[in-house]
Image (cartoon, rainbow, N blue to C red):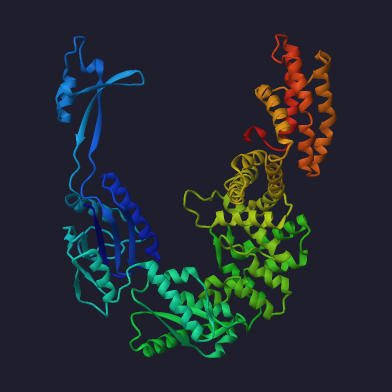
Amino acid sequence: MNRDFILEIGVEEMPSAFMGRSLTDFKNIAVQKLQEQRIKYASVATLGTPRRLVLYIKGLQENQDDALIENKGPKKNSAFDQDGNPSKAAIGFARGQGIQVSDLEIREIAGVEYVFAIKKEVGGQTESLLPGILLDIINSLSFPKSMRWGYYHTRFARPIRWLLALYGDKAINLQVENVISSNYTSGHRFLAPEPISVDSIDGYFAALRDHYVIVDQVERKKMIWHQVQEVANSAGGTAMENEHLLNEVTFLVEYPTAFYGEFSASYLDVPPEVLTTSMIEHQRYFPVFDDGNKLLPGFIGVRNGTDYRLDLVKAGNERVLKARLEDALFFWKEDTQKVLAEMVPGLKEVLFHERLGSILDKVGRLQEMAVLVGKANGLSTSEKLGRAAYLCKADLRSNMVYEFPELQGIMGRYYANEDGEDSEVADAILEHYLPRFAGDSLPASETGIVLSLAEKLCNLTAFFAIGIKPSGSQDPYALRRQALGIVNIIIDMGLKLDLRQLIGQAYEGVQMLKPNKNREDTVNDLMDFILQRMRGIMLDRGLSYDVIDAVLYQAGGDLSVIMLRAEVLRKFKMSSHWEDFQVVFNRSYNLSRKWEIAVVRTEILEDASEKALYQHYLQLKPMVEMAVQEKRYEAALEMLAGMRADIDRFFEAVMVMVEDEELKAARLGILKVIAGLCNSLADFSKVL
């Protein structure tokens, strides 16, 4: 009979940031270990609160599955002599496997015969195997940071304080250092601190709920959001939707109770981003907005407990937030006493990178690059771009950004507007950081678009030039994100930029810093890196692997052209001309792909079909090249598909691989130049 199983690892409060990944790892490791031990189950789930990690297995099989174990031994001719008598090798192998020599089997592998020991292993009882499996699972868990407790050697996210392990109604014996498992759990730290006896799996969940613990994080998350919405509605507003904050709060409490707190409306003079950042990042409160999306002088907190004396909790939280908002108001007043431009010289004291100088040095390079990018696409003006680039990092020297680093760019725009700077320049100070994450908005103003591209190109080029690029999961300077930003901006905005040229110009700005790589290698490496990011974006947009590979093989520096070719090719594959084009390309390419000489000696040609085919090619070549130059790719493909009839007649009339070497060379030359003309649009050998 299958039974349910539960393991609870009781700990001191774990950081909320650890919980999501830890629960996923907990489940995956448990599944892996059970499969290795051949123990079946109906389902595996992991649950958690700040004080416990829970493994819940439904329908855990009572016994391991039996196993047929096959071990390969020596070769047959080493194990037995010509008369079939076993050698010492066979006898020793059989003894080592615990079987008789007569039980050995002969099997052939890759034409060679080997002896095999085939043993049936009867599955053991799950109950007796669980202690070892559970200990293995616990020791396999890893965390961003772990610690030891007392004089013990086991490392865990936080010290383990209790263990509960139940298989049906039976307690499983397990010990981790000084902690021995039992059928006791703990409720809420303050509301139910006494140990709780548990006699069954159902009793476990009921006991925890009765003692103020909602162990299922999904249920707890729904409770929190429902309460937050109800409290916001009661206050006449709407709570901010913030998935990250909601997840964080879910793993900060075991028994949630939401409440509404207030602060003085005088603090609303400070930019709303400052107030919401202070509420979210420092206090884990939900900001509240009115119907016009204007911030209200209130917040929603979530208490870890019941509504008992909630008025005192509210008052305490209001006092803490008031102190935070007082600081924010002070920083705002201090920063606005001087203009943003006065903060720029101070960037000399802020190090960008030990090899790349200060932020002020970077600003100088950024000014030059922004003007170049703007001119390359006819966006904005040199004056706006130069000014925006000069001011875009100035807020790093402000009191507000020093206290709230996540407000860089946001505060710069506010300060620029306070100083009366051009509105597009002010917007560009924020927009040059965009996009900051997957799904983030792109810069909207011309100056912001250019400055964002220039910033990312400067950063990527500088780091690649000194030999720093992402490896594996390591990307401390967010270079992948910046490359993705470049691709998304260029494609979505339809910009026409030669990235190879711009990267080369960006390289000139860091050449005086004695980079590790020369200009050509830096351009090639960075371009390949950007194209790899583009590959992922194209896949996300529904393009197939073969189409992507085809258009990327000879990719230039204009990403919009690459994307256009891919879209045209995808559409052309579904057209009535595709079959004809495939015949033209495949019959030409397959025979000539190993032929290196794309030269046709017309005086050698004999048959009318080959002469007509070559003349058709000569007629089409300038027309196709002009269509490609004018980005009329579909028209170029249709013209090439029109060679189908001549290709068919050619192959019906002549044999290409004739003994006459000169004639063979001429015919292969015709096919080579036709395949080459097709491949001027994409590498069609990669298209399925």
Towards the viewer: 615 or 390: 615
Q: Quadrant of the C terminus?
A: top right
Of residue 665 and residue 193, the one placed in the foreground of this image is 193
The vertical placement of 621 against 246, above or below, is: above
Horizontally, residue 515 falls left or right of residue 631, namely: left
List x then y, in percent, for residue 445: 71, 66
Image location (x, y in percent) of residue 648: 75, 22
In the rendered structure, the answer to whether residue 52 lies left or right of residue 279 reads left
Residue at image location 23% in from the left, 68% down from the top? 203
- Residue 24 versus residue 350: which sits nearer the camera? 24
Q: Is residue 679 above or below residue 591?
A: below
The answer to whether any part of residue 283 appears in the image is no
Q: Quadrant of residue 489?
A: bottom right
Q: List the single residue furthest toward the front.
A: 1
Query: What residue sits 58% from the left and 71% below the top?
Result: 408
The image shows residue 589 at horizontal and vertical percentages of: 68, 26
Does residue 475 appear anywhere in the picture? yes
Residue 660 higher or lower than 69, as above or below: above
Q: Is residue 391 left or right of residue 131?
A: right
Q: Residue at horizontal 69%, vertical 25%?
A: 587
Q: How many numbered marks are there?
A: 0
Tell me where residue 562 sits by quadrant.
top right
Query: At which x and y percent is residue 652?
Result: 74, 17
Looking at the image, which residue is at 74% across and 52% down?
496
Q: Name the one closer to the observer, 403 or 448.
A: 448
